[in-house]
Image: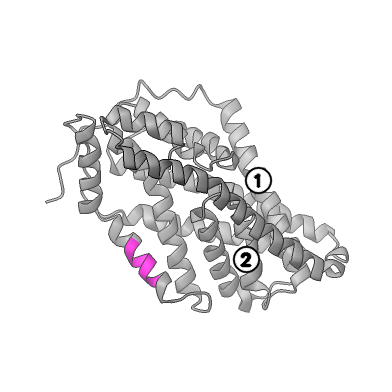
């Protein structure tokens, strides 16, 4: 998703004329968008505050011990590793599009832009990566889809993990959603989307995918498992976690993380993730301990992302990718 003003500029650059009725629809959506954002924010805050009110005494009795800090350190280490792994998987996606960037440079782009997802709009991390890939000489369609494919594969991975570990939080619509995403990232469909975008932009040498993105998809599955392990470690800092609970904890985490990813108006899934995780796990974990664990995990996540972005920014060269050129385009899928 691109911010409204940027979207207008992009459409104009593609030569797409906005018709009057489209303008009216855009005005209506522009008016409704802030209302939707406030509705989501208000709903999540109400749920969290009510849960905190109902279990306030349990929360006040929580204590962090020396063992708790060991678990939190482990959660921070695992979460930081998950972000590094996710950046590496992103380089796999780029390579599928013929964009063979040096791994270290691509990781710096990924980690620096990752912190931008907490800015209002929740799109700036994608926008920054699209700009970086475009400066490398990529076509408009290739740059856009190579970046936006990552959240699509993450969504599919979250559904795969949640459905594989537990059926308690899933319904038939979740399975349909998984099938839709898996079909949507098929090379035949993606190549048509790339061709359309590049035709509008008058690019004749667009890169085409030659195979299904199984390797990046499995990479995103491991990313979700890493993130889930970080969540379990943060929860273990103040609660007793049994091995028998791992499947439901990881499944609920994956589903809550997915909703935080796809629901608009929640930068970084803030509020949406916490609300969903509490709703799914309130029968599994003591509510007071669950509240504390969710809060600690959010803190660990933000610290890991900001620290990684800061280290990448300070220690890496300027994030200028204009001198890098994509490989020759691959043959279309037959």
Count of numbered circles on the image? 2
Mark 1 / mark 2, whichever is N-terminal:
2
Compared across the picture, whether 210 is left or right of 289 comes to left
Where is residue 320? Give x, y as percent: 44, 22
Label 1 to label 2, Cα distance in Å? 17 Å
13, 268: nearer the viewer = 13
Where is residue 42? Give x, y as percent: 66, 56
Q: Residue 204: which disc?
A: none
Q: Residue 277: which disc?
A: 2
Q: Which residue is mark 1?
A: 302
Q: Eyeballing the image, is 244 above or below 151? A: below
Magenta residues, as a range? 175-180
Q: Label 2: few (<14), some or many (≥20) within 10 Å?
A: many
Helix, strand or loop for the magenta stretch, by majority: helix
Q: Determine the residue positioned at 60% across, 26% down.
A: 314
Q: Determine the residue positioned at 36% across, 25% down.
A: 135
Q: Is residue 134 visible?
A: yes
**Magenta region includes residue 325:** no
- Where disc 2 sits, the SS reads helix
Q: How is the image coloured?
A: one colour
Where is residue 303? Give x, y as percent: 68, 44
Q: Is residue 94 visible?
A: no
Q: Eyeballing the image, is 65 above or below 20? A: below
Q: Which one is in front in this view, the residue at disc 1 or the one at disc 2? A: 2
Where is residue 101? Give x, y as percent: 37, 32
Q: Determine the residue positioned at 40% across, 60% down.
A: 156
Q: Eyeballing the image, is 59 above or below 200? A: below
Q: Quadrant of residue 194?
A: top left
275, 61: nearer the viewer = 275
């Amino acid at each position: 998703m691109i911010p409204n003003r940027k979207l207008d500029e992009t459409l104009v650059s593609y030569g797409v004329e906005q018709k009057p009725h489209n303008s009216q629809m855009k005005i209506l959506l522009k008016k409704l968008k802030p209302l939707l954002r406030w509705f989501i924010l208000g709903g999540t805050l109400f749920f969290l505050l009510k849960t905190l009110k109902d279990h306030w005494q349990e929360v006040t009795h929580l204590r962090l011990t020396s063992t708790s800090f060991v678990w939190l350190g482990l959660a921070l280490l695992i979460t930081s590793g998950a972000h590094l792994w996710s950046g590496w998987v992103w380089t796999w996606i780029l390579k599928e599009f013929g964009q063979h960037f040096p791994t270290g440079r691509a990781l710096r782009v990924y980690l620096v832009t990752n912190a931008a997802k907490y800015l209002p709009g929740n799109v700036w991390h994608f926008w920054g990566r699209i700009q970086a890939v475009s400066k490398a000489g990529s076509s408009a369609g290739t740059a856009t889809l190579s970046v936006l494919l990552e959240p699509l594969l993450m969504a599919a991975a979250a559904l795969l993990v949640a459905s594989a570990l537990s059926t308690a939080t899933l319904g038939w619509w979740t399975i349909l959603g998984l099938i839709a995403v898996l079909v949507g990232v098929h090379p035949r469909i993606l190549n048509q989307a790339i061709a359309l975008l590049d035709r509008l932009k008058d690019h004749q040498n667009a890169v085409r995918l030659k195979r299904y993105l199984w390797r990046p998809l499995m990479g995103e599955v491991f990313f979700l498992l890493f993130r889930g392990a970080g969540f379990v470690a943060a929860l273990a800092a103040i609660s007793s976690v049994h091995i028998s609970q791992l499947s439901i904890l990881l499944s609920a985490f994956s589903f809550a993380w997915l909703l935080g990813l796809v629901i608009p108006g929640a930068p970084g899934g803030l509020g949406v993730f916490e609300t969903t995780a509490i709703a799914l796990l309130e029968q599994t974990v003591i509510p007071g301990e669950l509240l504390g664990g969710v809060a600690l995990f959010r803190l660990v996540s933000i610290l890991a992302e900001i620290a990684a972005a800061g280290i990448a920014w300070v220690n890496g060269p300027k994030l200028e990718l204009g001198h890098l050129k994509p490989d020759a385009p691959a043959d279309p899928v037959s």
